[in-house]
Image: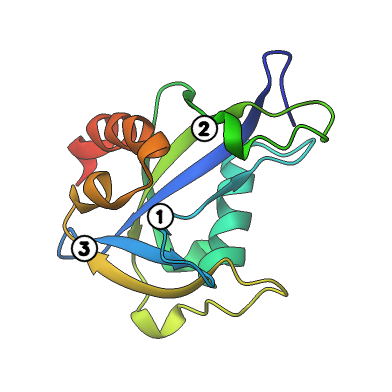
Amino acid sequence: MIDSNGFRANVGIILSNCDGKVFWARRAGQKAWQFPQGGIDINETPEDAMYRELHEETGLLAEHVELVGKTDDWLRYRIPDHLLRRRSKPLCIGQKQIWFYLRLTGCENDFDLCCSDRPEFDSWRWVDYWTPVDEIVAFKRNVYKQALSQLQRYA
């Protein structure tokens, strides 16, 4: 769903373990690392989208995590001009995201990066809470800072 301003509705997921480390995943076939995220489908709530994306990208189910908190409002980032898909209509110029903070209650054996037809990630690791700000692609850096800052109280 792309709104009238050109932003696609999306969810972002910060998943922590019992040690306060966060799940950090490498995009399949790339050198880029990121948190799980994905679009919100028509007639889907942000929470429903979050659980769907969590499963598609990590293999985890709702029973493997505890929903601890979420951002109060949408956080936005713009896609750099050279990455815009200008032939797509309507044109998506960025994403607006509700971010969720989850705590793993299952075990690491519950992860399955290959549970979907097109895996999003091919590797993952636990990292310190603020590490993603330094490692995320530059155009997402500010939204990562905002999400981590707002959700830090749950860490």
Decide which of 144, 87 is in the foreground and name it.
87
Q: Tag 2: Cα neighbours inside 10 Å, few (<14), some, or many (≥20)?
A: many
Residue at image mark 3? 127
The kind of residue tagged 3 is Val
Mark 3 Cα-neighbour bin, 10 Å: few <14, some 14–19, many ≥20:
some
Q: Residue, x 35% and y 79% (percent of image)?
A: 107
Q: Give the Cα separation between the discs numbered 2 and 3.
A: 22 Å
Secondary element at tag 1 = strand
Nearer to the camera, 93 or 130: 93
Residue 73, placed above or below residue 16: above
Q: Which quadrant of the view contains residue 118?
A: bottom right
Contact (CB < 8 A) between labels 2 and 1? no
Label 1: few (<14), some or many (≥20) within 10 Å? many
Label 1 sits on residue:
34
Rounded to the nearest angstrom, the CA distance separating label 3 from label 1 is: 11 Å
Query: Where 55 falls versus 7 (above or below)?
Result: below
